[in-house]
Image (cartoon, rainbow, N blue to C red):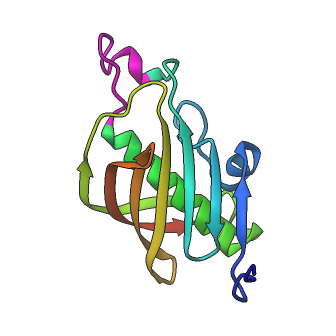
Amino acid sequence: MDQAAPPNTTMESYGIAQIMAAIPHRYPFLLIDRVVDMVLGESAVGVKNVTINEFFFQGHFPSEPVMPGVLIVESMAQTAAVLVVATLGEHAQGKLVYFMSVDNAKFRRPVVPGDQIRVHVAKVQRRMNVWKFSAQAKVDGIVVAEATYAAMIRDR
């Protein structure tokens, strides 16, 4: 027997057009392709398909391409930003979400071309316009990076 979602909880999925409407990031720094399994106000999963065509592989590293860890953390932040905007509604679209802190960032294994990163973010706390999240980036179900971070949403 299927259970209905609890009241005020919505499962959503955002494609690239909805992501671009929600957050101001653009190529080459739009680092998520889709957001799935979104529970408004609680959690979401961002999807990043990593290809050899990524701009950063030209220099990091040409003979052994590895996605920079800071960009994995940025994909975590972008996933959380989409969740925040979806939770707050249309009036929040296009607002900026600024990092306030990044804590306990750990990188477990390299991310390489051909990998699909699934970024699992969960809200830890919200106070006014400041949100705190925990996140894990996974490839094939294996944690490749994790961090906790706080961000502030504000007008441009």
Residue drawn 26% across the image and 55% down it? 105
Residue drawn 57% across the image and 63% down it? 44
The answer to whether 152 appears left or right of 89 in the picture is: left
Question: Looking at the image, which is closer to me, 106 or 17?
Answer: 106
Residue found at the far front of this picture: 1
Q: Position of residue 25 (x, y in %)?
A: 59, 44
Q: Position of residue 38 (x, y in %)?
A: 64, 65
The residue segment tinted magenta is 56-68
Q: Is residue 57 magenta?
A: yes
Which quarter of the rendered picture does the C terminus lie within?
bottom right
**Main secondary structure found in the magenta portion:** loop
**Residue 115 visible somewhere in the drawing:** yes
Question: Looking at the image, which is closer to me, 22 or 14?
Answer: 14
Residue found at the far top of this picture: 63
Residue drawn 45% across the image and 53% down it? 76
Question: Looking at the image, which is closer to me, 8 or 91?
Answer: 8
